[in-house]
Structures are given as structure tokens and as C-alpha cells.
């Protein structure tokens, strides 16, 4: 299925007083169903703005987003969303936090009990189902948040630097978890990050955003086999991808 | 029992301090030859106070009624207005600045006016307690309902849940800790409001009692009255703290973790 998501001349301008601040665009891209697309760029380039506009969670100043030919006018609800700061609420246990997603959607929690257990198990959190989020480490919290974002089998998953606050080792582990789940369910993923390595390891396509005002300058198809484990990461091709992206950002004067 | 011993392990210093404080008070009266119409010894306060116990208990009941009634009305009104202002941009631009400016006036200054409007009965005292308690509750409630994190807001929007559902499942529980900051602050002020109202115009209650016995040069009875007032204040505050533990146990444990 081609052109699952079609973005045309999308632009966001924030107005503060008399000043107009270009947050993003204008930019156009198409995303296919089941793609894992990374949006890679320096901080402040508007990548999160782009992600929120795609989901209808933020109004665009001009341009349009279409899903399977249908114009996005209000927040999309067939999505799962995950941020740098997780959306686990402190008054519920991990399991109850996953159920919150279902309750808010009016789905029957009872029908999902097995599924909740399985998804927790897939990220090795099955023994922590009845703990509160503040009893878990940052990495465990993000894994739980991932279960919360995935439990209703969304067709589209939006990840906004979900690993931003974690240490290198934990990031590595969670990347592998993400990849495993994506390979099984094949949702369309839009992954906002400023880590070049993360983008290359996970994505089927990397979209490079220029510094302010953020524009889509280049996109790179990552032609590497999944799962992209340590062996793939050691390969010559992987390193070449990293280097070519490094060069682009060096050109921008970002690094 | 285990918790009691645990408390004793850390609380014994406080107990020793209190005992020391009252012993110092008791023996400094004869030592420094302080006249008893200026400052009575604790033992005298206990003995004279217990002779007046019936009256003290009755008056405590009166003041407690004013305090508790006013306090609960303030909670209902404060939460109601707080939620309404948080959800309505018109109210946020009108009522909110109005409340903030009234917060700056000492509410107690209205007390004589209320007495002159509504007489010496229960109502003016309750109104003054409401007035004193309302503002910290409403201002904290507005803050509470407006400080939901950006992430949680986007999360509930992405689920398509309606306003009522998100209110009860996310906004209300998220707001409760900050609301309790207001409830607790108001609990401290509630007895103050009741007593000052009684000072100004009443024929019963602990405030009335304290002002009468002080006029009769009986500081021993005044201290007895103050003791009962303290107990009343502690009870109200204790009740709110207990409600906090029951309603938001997760918040208490979170605070403990952070300490």
C-alpha cells in the first residue's frame, strides 16, 4: 500500500508578540504502511512539531496531512504515542497504567488480560505488573510506557525521543525490544531522535531535518537486514550509513 | 505496635523536649516570682481548667461546629470554582484575577461587617470561616487543574476519550496532591477565623470564653481555652492529613521515596 501517510507543504509558525518563529517546514513527505521512519535532526529543529502535526495533535499553519487519502483535522486516535517523559500515572500500577489506555478508549479491560501479560513479558516486566512506576528504574518505566502505547495494536506509533533520558546500555536493550516488537506487528512507526546510530539501527528510512527553520533536506533508505543486532552494527555498510549522515550534519554546521 | 516503637525511636526527642518545656514553665514561675495573674503555672491551668471543664467542652463544641461547617463549605465552593475556572477561559479572565486580588485583603477585616449584617448567631462565624478558607483552596485548585503535563494531555487526546472520562481518570487524580496543599493551609486558618469571629461578637464559643476570662484577669482559664482550641485545630488538620493518606496513598509514598 503506497502513500499511507501523505504530507504536503506542511508548515508551522508560532507567533510570539510581533515575532514570527518558524517552527517547521514547509515540507512534504510520503510514508508507506509498515515503515519505520526516523526523523533525525538537531535539537530545536521542529521534529517533535512535525510528529504532533502528523498525529493531528497540533494544528498546522498551512499545508495538509492525509492518511489513506483522508485529511487529518482532529487528533488521530488509531495511534500509540510515547515521549521522553513517560505517560505513566503515579496512582496506578504498571498493569493498571496499561489498562488506562484501554479504559480511555472504551475497550473491555477483561478481554486484554492475556495480552497485557504477554506484552509485559516481551519486555521482561511481567514480575513488575503490580508495582507503581516510581518503584521502577527509568529504563523499566520507558519499557512499561512502550507497552502502554502498544497494547491496543495501533496502526501508527509515534515515538518522541523515548530513549532520550536513558543511559547508553539501557538504550541498547530497549532498542532491541522495540525492534523485536516492530518486526512482529509491523506498525508504521515515526521515530523522532537526535541519535544517528539509533536512527540507522532501527529505521527503514531516515529523514534528515535541517537546523532552524527545520526542513526536510534529504532522506536515506537504510538497506540492512533485520534484526539489526551487533553483527549488523559491526558491518561496513552500517558504519558507512553513520558516516554519510555525520557528513550531512557537519555540512549543516551542527556537528 | 511495631510502628509505635518505630515512632518512639525517632519521636523520643520531641517527647523529652515537651516534658522539659513544661517543667521549665512550671518551675520558672516561683523562681522568677512571676505573678499568677500574668502567667499561671501549667499545674494551675490544669486544676482551674478542669473545674470549668463542662463549659470548656460545650464551647469547644460550638467553635468546632463553626469551624467544620465553614471548612467543608469552603472545600465544596473552592473545588467547584477551581474546576470551573480551570475549564472556562472566560472565568479565567474574570473571576480568577478577582479572586487573586481579594486574596491580598486580610479577610478577617470583614468580620465586624458580617457580625453587623448577620447578627451574633452561627451564620456570620461560618461565613467568616468560609471566607478565610475559600481562597487558599480555590487558588490551589486552579493551579492543580492547570498543571497537567503536556505529555499526559497529548496522551489522553490520542485516545479520543471524552471530557468526563479524562476528568475522572486523569485530571482529577493528577490534581489531588496540589488540592490538598490548599486544604491543609485552609485547615490551619479555619480555627483562626472562627475564634476571631467569636472575639468580635458572640455569646458562646472558645473565642468568647478566652476574651471574657482574660478580661476577668484569669489567664489560667484563658490558657485552658487555648489548650482546647489547639486540640480542635490539631483534630481538623489531623483529619485532612488522614484523608490525604486515604485518597492519595501513592502521593505519600512518592514523597517518601524522594526523601
Image: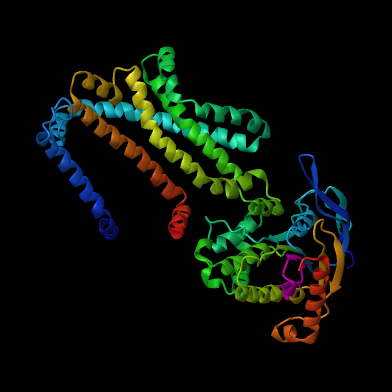
Mark count = 0
Identify the residue at image location x=36%, y=29%. B192
Membership of B37 in magenta stretch: no
Residue ID at (31%, 26%): B62
Question: In screen coordinates, is B184 left or right of B156?
Answer: left
Q: Is residue A105 visible?
A: no
Residue furthest to the front in view is A253
Quarter of the picture holding the N terminus of chain B? bottom left
Q: Identify the image's colour scheme: rainbow, by chain, secondary structure or one colour.
A: rainbow
The quadrant the C terminus of chain B occupies is bottom left
Q: Residue at x 29, y 35 (%)?
A: B230
User: Quick one: B35 or B133, which is closer to the camera?
Assistant: B35
Residues rendered magenta in the picture:
A182-199
Measuring from the top left, give residue B31's x and y in whole percent: 10, 36
When the figure is inspected, residue A41 is found, relative to residue B181, above or below; the finding is below
Specify whether B226 is left or right of A147.
left
Q: Is residue A235 above or below residue A149?
A: below
The answer to which image quadrant residue B186 occupies is top left
Name the spot of residue A93 as percent of width and height, x first.
53, 61
The answer to whether one can see residue A245 in this image is yes
Q: Quadrant of residue B132?
A: top left
Q: Is residue A140 left or right of residue B27?
A: right
Residue A245 percent location from the top left of the image: 81, 73
Q: Which of the pair A163/A82 is nearer the observer?
A: A163
In reply to whether residue A186 is colored magenta, the answer given is yes
Q: Residue at x 69, y 84 (%)?
A: A230
The image quarter containing residue B49 is top left
Please indicate whether residue B1 sits to the left or right of residue A69 in the image: left
Q: Position of residue B33 (x, y in %)?
A: 11, 31
Amino acid at each position: 500500500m503506497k502513500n499511507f501517510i501523505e504530507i504536503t507543504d506542511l508548515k508551522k509558525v508560532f507567533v510570539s508578540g510581533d515575532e514570527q518563529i518558524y517552527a517547521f517546514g514547509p515540507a512534504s513527505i510520503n510514508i508507506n504502511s509498515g515503515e519505520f521512519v526516523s526523523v533525525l535532526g538537531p535539537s530545536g529543529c521542529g521534529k517533535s512539531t512535525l510528529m504532533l502535526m502528523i498525529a493531528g495533535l497540533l494544528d498546522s499553519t498551512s499545508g495538509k496531512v492525509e492518511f489513506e487519502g483522508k485529511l487529518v483535522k482532529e487528533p488521530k486516535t488509531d495511534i500509540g504515542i510515547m515521549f521522553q517523559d513517560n505517560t505513566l500515572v503515579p496512582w496506578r500500577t504498571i498493569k493498571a497504567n496499561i489498562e488506562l489506555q484501554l479504559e480511555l478508549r472504551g475497550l473491555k479491560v477483561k478481554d486484554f488480560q492475556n495480552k497485557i501479560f504477554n506484552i509485559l513479558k516481551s519486555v521482561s516486566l511481567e514480575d513488575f505488573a503490580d508495582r507503581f512506576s516510581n518503584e521502577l528504574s527509568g529504563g523499566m518505566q520507558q519499557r512499561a510506557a512502550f507497552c502502554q502505547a502498544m497494547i491496543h495494536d495501533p496502526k501508527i506509533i509515534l515515538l518522541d525521543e523515548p530513549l532520550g533520558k536513558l543511559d547508553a546500555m539501557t538504550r541498547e536493550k530497549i532498542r532491541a525490544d522495540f525492534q523485536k516488537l516492530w518486526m512482529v506487528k509491523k506498525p508504521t512507526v515515526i521515530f523522532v531522535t537526535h541519535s544517528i546510530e539509533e536512527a540507522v539501527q532501527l529505521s527503514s528510512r531516515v529523514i534528515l531535518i535541517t537546523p532552524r527553520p527545520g526542513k526536510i533536506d534529504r532522506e536515506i533508505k537504510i538497506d540492512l537486514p533485520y534484526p539489526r543486532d551487533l553483527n549488523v552494527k559491526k558491518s561496513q555498510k552500517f558504519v558507512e550509513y553513520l558516516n554519510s549522515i555525520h557528513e550531512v550534519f557537519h555540512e549543516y554546521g551542527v556537528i | 505496635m511495631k510502628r509505635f516503637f518505630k515512632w518512639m525511636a525517632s519521636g523520643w526527642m520531641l517527647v523529652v523536649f515537651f516534658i522539659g518545656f513544661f517543667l521549665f514553665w512550671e518551675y520558672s514561675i516561683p523562681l522568677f516570682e512571676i505573678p499568677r495573674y500574668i502567667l499561671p503555672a501549667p499545674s494551675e491551668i490544669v486544676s482551674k481548667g478542669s473545674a470549668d471543664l463542662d463549659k470548656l467542652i460545650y464551647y469547644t463544641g460550638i467553635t468546632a461546629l463553626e469551624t467544620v461547617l465553614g471548612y467543608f463549605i469552603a472545600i465544596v465552593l473552592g473545588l467547584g470554582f477551581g474546576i470551573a475556572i480551570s475549564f472556562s477561559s472566560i472565568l479565567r479572565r474574570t473571576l480568577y484575577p478577582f479572586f487573586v486580588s481579594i486574596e491580598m485583603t486580610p479577610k478577617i477585616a470583614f468580620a465586624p461587617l458580617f457580625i453587623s449584617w448577620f447578627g451574633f448567631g452561627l451564620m456570620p462565624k461560618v461565613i467568616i470561616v468560609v471566607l478565610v478558607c475559600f481562597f487558599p483552596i480555590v487558588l490551589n485548585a486552579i493551579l492543580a487543574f492547570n498543571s497537567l503535563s503536556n505529555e499526559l494531555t497529548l496522551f489522553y487526546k490520542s485516545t479520543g476519550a471524552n471530557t468526563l472520562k479524562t476528568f475522572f481518570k486523569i485530571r482529577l487524580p493528577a490534581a489531588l496532591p496540589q488540592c490538598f496543599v490548599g486544604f491543609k493551609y485552609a485547615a490551619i486558618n479555619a480555627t483562626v477565623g472562627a475564634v476571631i469571629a467569636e472575639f468580635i461578637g458572640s455569646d458562646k464559643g472558645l473565642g468568647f470564653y478566652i476574651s471574657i476570662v482574660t478580661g476577668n484577669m484569669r489567664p489560667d482559664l484563658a490558657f485552658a481555652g487555648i489548650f482546647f482550641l489547639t486540640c480542635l485545630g490539631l483534630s481538623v488538620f489531623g483529619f485532612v492529613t488522614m484523608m490525604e493518606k486515604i485518597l492519595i496513598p501513592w502521593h505519600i509514598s512518592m514523597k517518601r521515596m524522594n526523601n
